[in-house]
Amino acid sequence: MVTFKVVIGTKDGKCVQKEVGEPDSKSLIGKKVGDTIKGESFGLTGYEFLITGGSDYAGFPMRKDIPGQGRKRILAITGVGMKKARKGQRQRKTVCGNTIHSNISQINLKITQEGKNPLTEPKKEEKAKPEEAKKETPKEEVKK
């Protein structure tokens, strides 16, 4: 049984997480980083997404320039999975390929076309009751 955690980056800079179960996750298997997918495949009608990356079950990041499904050890200078310590430094890193498969646990998406329904419901702020506000702030009289 394959389930993915989908992290959707919105245009206002916030992220929304969604769990994609077995029947819907089959439409994501075989897609590559950089492909576009329709939101109807996992219940978000009207939306269109761009696959920007992800990570496998052990936390290794997916790289767009590595073909295939498995993990590979690469000699990297910059890019995904690298922290630049000094100029010209190369480091051997284990990364995951660019194709989504059953061992991927998280998929990162970016919205390219928005649908009619919002992804999240806006939070309702608690309004202070007028009676409590009057009790908390008593007015003092000024005597002359």
Image (tube, rainbow, N blue to C red):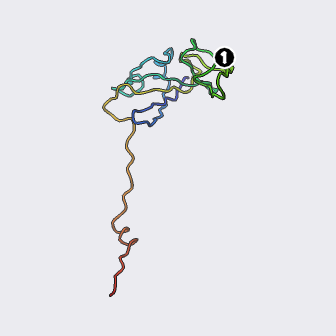
Q: Which residue is mark 1?
A: 75
Comparing 9 with 77, the one in front is 77
**Up-down: is 87 above or below 144?**
above
Location of residue 115 (image quadrant) = top left
The image position of residue 83, as x and y in percent, is 63, 28
* SS state under label 1: strand
User: Looking at the image, which is closer to me, 37 or 94?
Assistant: 94
Identify whether 27 is placed above or below 6.
above
59 lies left or right of 31: right
Outermost residue on the bottom side: it is 144
Quadrant (top left, top right, bottom left, bottom right) of the C terminus: bottom left
Location of residue 17 with respect to 2 vertically, above or below: below
Quarter of the image with the N terminus in it: top right
Query: At which x and y percent is residue 105?
Result: 57, 26
Which residue ends up furthest to the left in the rendered image? Answer: 116
Quadrant housing residue 120:
top left
Instruction: Kindly indicate the quadrant of the structure image that contains residue 141.
Output: bottom left
The residue depicted at 54 percent of the width and 27 percent of the height is 106
Horizontal side of 30 relative to 143 (left or right) equals right
**Residue 12 image point, x, y percent:** 40, 36
Q: Position of residue 71 (x, y in %)?
A: 64, 17
Q: Which amino acid does the dot numbered 1 rest on? A: Leu
In the picture, measured across the screen, residue 86 lies left or right of residue 112, that is: right
Residue occupying the point 57% across, 21% down: 62
